[in-house]
Image (cartoon, rainbow, N blue to C red):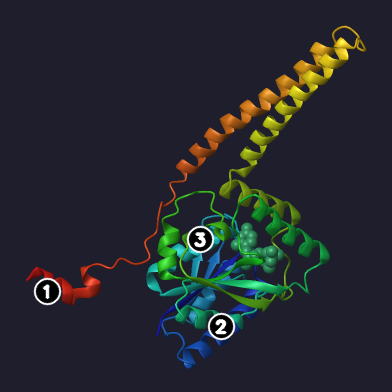
Amino acid sequence: MDTLYLVIPCYNEEEVLPETAKQLLQKMNALIAEKKISNKSRIVFVNDGSKDRTWEIISQYHTENPIYQGICLSRNRGHQNALLAGLMTVKDHCDLTISLDADLQDDIDAIDAMIDKYYDGNDVVYGVRSARKTDTFFKKFTAESFYKIMKHLGADVVYNHSDYRLMSRRALDALHSYKEVNIFLRGVVPMIGYPSDIVYYERKERFAGTSKYPLKKMLSFAWEGITSLSTKPITLITRLGMLIFLVSIVMLIYSLVRHIMGATITGWTSLIVSIWAIGGLQLLAIGIIGQYIGKVYLETKERPRFIIKTYLDDETNSESAHNLAK
Ligand code: UDP
Ligand code: MG
């Protein structure tokens, strides 16, 4: 039986925490009783610099029942960092983790299916929303456009998957080798490349409290995702530069023809041609410089160049190694 740690980032969640803690405890006890997970499994709350009583509540739960653990960050660092802090702190104590939001919008009954898929040999199991019935039209529209734009701009994210996700210890170790500071977990986890699967669930309404992701945070989150995963915007600038430069050649021919036909006033031809040519060349030059900056940017991330899944060495076949030695 493997040990499961649930990791839950919490920012000003005093209103939902009691209910969340209660429901998660029931879930964990049921899973332990079914012998799906070991009784060393834990529920870990990460307090992301909350300004309300969140941390007091977490500490109190921990004293009452050691199944609850708490991690307190020095200040608010945002959802992604809080989640990463939790995962990296617990990874050496468990065999698998599941990350979920404190507001129970992600159906916790999907946990069973996730664990089954883990025992089937998957290192990562993504929770994916099958429907967004309870989200407002605005939230649904912005969120779904976000996934589409991300994909278009070269960031490989799982459609309609937030951070409700199972990860094995092996996958967490791989994640640990991504040293980048601007980490966007939803984009980096698929890069790891270990076997993965999907579990569908219906997203519920926030149980209590308000969303900690107002539009402003959502936009900056989307921008963060794009700029930390992809250098495609730079390529777009280079292409635009090339396009405008080509237009300038067309304009050159066009205005020469007009000039020869005598249908222009003095100075028009040279003016028009230089405006287009200079503009195109400038954009092109910025794009080319950008390409190099993009490379430097990717280098500074020091991402792992490969992650080894299996190595068939002497140990995996000790008998033949023994024979060779003879
Ligand atoms: N959260 C966090 N730090 C923040 C903002 C949010 O740890 O700065 C946590 C929050 O407590 C919740 C999760 O991230 O557990 C998702 O936030 P929320 O439910 O407000 O987002 P939504 O579901 O509205 O997108
Ligand atoms: Mg939520």
Residue 36 screen position, x and y as percent: 46, 87
CB at disc 2 and ligand 2 closer than 8 Å: no
Residue visible at 60% across and 56% down in the picture: 78
The residue closer to the viewer here, 184 or 19, is 184
Asked if the residue under mark 3 is in contact with the one under mark 2, i.e. CB atoms within 8 Å, the reply is no
| Labelled disc at residue 113 | 2
Q: In which quarter of the image is the C terminus?
A: bottom left
Q: Which residue is drawn at 63% across and 67% down?
A: 161
Q: Which of marks 1 and 3 is in front?
A: 1
Q: Mark 3 points at which residue?
A: 84
Where on the picture, by quarter, is residue 169? bottom left
**Mark 3: which secondary structure?**
helix
Q: How far apart are marks 2 and 3 (CA)?
A: 23 Å
Position in image of residue 148 (x %, y %): 70, 57
Q: Residue furthest right?
A: 263
Number of the front mark, 2 or 1: 1
Q: Is mark 3 within 8 Å of ligand 1?
A: no
**Looking at the rendered structure, which numbered label has been put on residue 323?**
1
User: In the image, is residue 141 above or below residue 169?
Assistant: above
Percent across and percent down for residue 255 are 83, 17
Residue name at image x 55 percent, y 84 percent: 112
